[in-house]
Amino acid sequence: MIFITVRFSVKPEYSESWLDLVADFTSATRAEPGNLWFDWSRSVDDPNEYVLVEAFRDGTGGAHVQSDHFRQAMKTLLPAITATPRIINFEVPGETWSAMGELEITQ
């Protein structure tokens, strides 16, 4: 799978409405056939930072960045950010989260 994490520094005037701003992009991406997850989190240390964790089946990332909703989101998000987003992008085996052995729940 293609595993991607992106950090967005958001202008303060957009920080409370960020999830509304990305709602259409989020729902369209989640509906893509190759999408495994597309989840937003807000930093607990910086209220103006959001982190996107997303994953796609192998070979489907290109379709995502070529989609109309991706291109539209890039135009929509640009005025709302303070810096170029930082990204980590890797191909990893599998298509789901692994269990964390150090905190395994047994009954």
Image (spheres, rainbow, N blue to C red):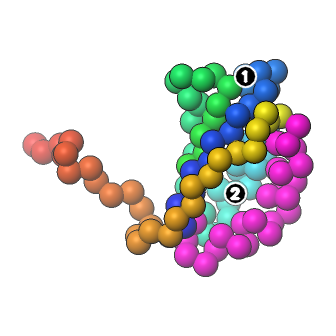
Q: Give the amino acid at mark 2.
A: Thr
Answer left or right for 37 relative to 94: right
- x, y percentage for residue 77? 82, 42
Residue 41 picture quarter: top right
Q: How many marks?
A: 2
The residue positioned 63% from the left and 35% from the top of the image is: 50
Question: Above or below — where is 42 with respect to 54?
Answer: above
Residue placed most toward the observer, 105 or 7: 7
Residue occupied by mark 2 = 29
User: Is-magenta flag for residue 61?
Assistant: yes
Residue sitting nearer the eye, 42 or 31: 42
- Residue shown at 79% from the left, 58% from the top: 70
Residue 103's spot in the image, x, y percent? 21, 42
From this view, report whether residue 3 is shown above or below residue 73: below
Q: In the image, residue 65 lies at what x, y percent?
A: 75, 65
* Residue 38 shows in this picture: no
Task: Name which residue type carries label 1.
Answer: Glu
Disc 1 crowd rating (10 Å Cα; few below 14, some 14-19, many 20+) is few
Instruction: From the image, tell me which residue sits under label 1.
Output: 16
**Overall secondary structure of the magenta section:** helix
Q: Residues within 10 Å of mark 2 (few under 14, many from 20)?
A: many
Residue at screen point 73% across, 72% down: 63
The picture places residue 105, in percent across and down from the top left corner, at 18, 43
Q: Earlier in the sequence, mark 1 or mark 2?
A: 1
Q: Secondary structure at mark 2?
A: helix
